[in-house]
Image (tube, rainbow, N blue to C red):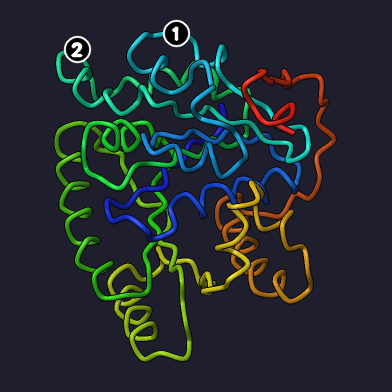
Amino acid sequence: MGRIYTIVNQKGGVGKTTTAINLGAYLAYYGQRVLLVDLDPQANATSCLRIEKSTVRGGVYEALIGSFPPTNYILHNPRLKMSILPATPALAGAEVELVTIISRESRLKKALATVSDRYDYTLVDCPPSLGLLTLNGIVAAKDGLMIPVQCEYLALEGLSQLLNTLERVRSSLFPELKVRGVILTMFDGRTNLSNDVLTEVRHYFQDDVFQSVVPRTVRLAEAPSYGQPISVYAPLPTVRRLMLPWHASCWKEMVGIFRGWKNENAASIRPWSWPGCLDPWW
């Protein structure tokens, strides 16, 4: 059975989608089978990987509401060696439709249970809210949550609200829920604010905070406009010195040991592409 992690924070713009895409890309680079689940109605993870969301024929919505197998809608990118369960415009109405469904908070968990054994890692990218979609992502995170925190004051305010929500989920729905790691993003060492936030978060979460931080870099912000993760968009020595330490930190802490490449049989993962996607999802 593969591992399922959910990237969550109800505050927008803290780097959830960037974290999910780039961590997934590096895990795939190291030979792991990765599934990215776009649970955000804005479909940023889908569009950031050069998939035209308006022409995708199905995705997370159908798996949540229609109870269709996720395998019907998973796309595979041979170049990045990773797969995605995309978001579609219909996902915007899922919050309302889920209200009347029995066990509405565990719909995603049940859907992913049918495909998680095909992947080493499933990364769920949540929307910037604390609604039913995010709740589904939290309940589905059987191996833990990853919380990106922007190195700014308002991000700390939102973090306290998220922690209260997690406590309620533990008490009523998912007692085994745990925080796998807190990721400090958009760090600018030249400012006192970034350093103060870093100190405060590490004081509160202690060993749950990844030691490496994600710096604020223009290349990382530009990559989505080209539909590429940073490992493809800017595989330059300068960028790699900035980004690889953090991804290596995540890798070692998530897996325990560095395994290197695995000679997976490419034919074991069905390559999906639809006419609506730009190219054969490359």
Apparent side of residue 153 relative to residue 239 in the rendered image (left or right): left
Apparent side of residue 178 relative to residue 165 in the rendered image (left or right): right
Residue in view at x 47 percent, y 49 percent: 17
Task: Give the CA distance from mark 2 to mark 1.
Answer: 16 Å
Front disc: 2 or 1: 1
Quadrant in which the C terminus appears: top right
Camera-nearest residue between 120 and 68: 68
Residue 155, image x and y in percent?
28, 67
Camera-nearest residue between 210 and 280: 280
**Count of labels in the image:** 2
Q: What amino acid is found at the position of numbered circle 2 in the picture?
A: Ile
Q: What amino acid is found at the position of numbered circle 1 in the picture?
A: Phe
Q: Is residue 213 above or below residue 3?
A: below
- Residue highlighted by disc 1: 68
Residue in view at x 15 percent, y 33 percent: 172
CA neighbours of label 1 inside 10 A, class few (<14), some (14 to 19), many (20+): some
Q: Is residue 183 above or below residue 122?
A: below
Residue 193, image x and y in percent?
33, 85
Disc 2, SS: loop
Q: Which mark is residue 139?
A: none
Disc 1, SS: loop
Q: Which mark is residue 102?
A: 2
Residue 38, image x and y in percent?
46, 35
Residue in view at x 32 percent, y 55 percent: 12
CA neighbours of label 2 inside 10 A, class few (<14), some (14 to 19), many (20+): few
Precedes in sequence: disc 2 or disc 1: 1
Residue in view at x 42 percent, y 52 percent: 146
Residue 49 image-quadrant placement: top right
Quadrant in which the N terminus appears: top right
